Image: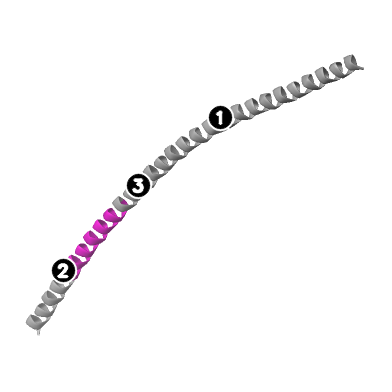
């Protein structure tokens, strides 16, 4: 009957509208999830960049400390070299003086 078919069509329309509404809601949830994921990715990138910058700053400070220690070691090495040369010179001078003394005694 015609009334029965109309009721069936109306029920089908209602079902289709409910499905469309459910799909729209699912789409809204997906868009929201995507937005949240993107925000988390941006936050992670920013955190990674901040951590990298902090590490670079820390490494730069260590580099400066190492450079200073190397400079101090180079100065000490030069001073040690001068001290050794001075001792060798003193030994040579004493040796020359001893030889002169020995020649005078001969």
Secondary structure at numbered mark 1: helix
Image x and y of residue 34, in percent: 29, 56
Magenta region: 17-38
Image x and y of residue 105, in percent: 89, 16
> What's the magenta bit mostly, secondary-structure-wise?
helix
Which of discs 1 and 3 lies nearer the camera? The answer is 1
Which of discs 2 and 3 lies nearer the camera? The answer is 3
Secondary structure at numbered mark 2: helix
Q: Is residue 85 magenta?
A: no
Q: Is residue 91 rendered to the left or right of residue 44?
A: right
- Which quadrant holds the N terminus? bottom left
Q: Label 2 to label 3, Cα distance in Å?
A: 45 Å
Give whichever of discs 1 and 3 has the lower sequence position. Answer: 3
Query: Is the residue marked by circle 2 packed among few (<14), some (14-19), or many (20+) residues within 10 Å?
Result: few
Q: Is residue 7 placed above or below 35 in the rendered structure?
A: below
Secondary structure at numbered mark 3: helix
Among all residues in the image, which is located at the extreme front?
105
Disc 1 target residue: 72
Q: Residue at x 48, y 38 (%)?
A: 62
Image x and y of residue 77, in percent: 63, 30
Quarter location, residue 89:
top right
Q: Which of 50 and 21 lies nearest the eye of the viewer?
A: 50
Q: Residue at x 67, y 24 (%)?
A: 82
Disc 3 target residue: 47
Q: Is residue 7 placed above or below 78 in the rendered structure?
A: below
Q: Which of 79 and 10 lies nearest the eye of the viewer?
A: 79
Q: Residue at x 67, y 25 (%)?
A: 83
Give whichever of discs 2 and 3 has the lower sequence position. Answer: 2
Quarter location, residue 19:
bottom left
> Could you tell me if the residues under marks 2 and 3 are in contact, i.e. CB atoms within 8 Å?
no
């Amino acid at each position: 009957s015609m009334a029965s078919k109309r009721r069936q069509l109306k029920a089908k329309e209602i079902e289709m509208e409910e499905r469309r509404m459910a799909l729209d809601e699912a789409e809204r949830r997906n868009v929201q999830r995507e937005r949240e994921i993107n925000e988390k990715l941006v936050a992670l990138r920013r955190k990674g960049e901040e951590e990298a910058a902090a590490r670079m700053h820390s490494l730069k400070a260590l580099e400066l400390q190492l450079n200073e220690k190397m400079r101090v070691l180079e100065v000490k090495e030069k001073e040690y070299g001068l001290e050794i040369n001075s001792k060798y010179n003193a030994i040579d001078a004493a040796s020359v003086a001893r030889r002169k003394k020995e020649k005078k005694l001969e």
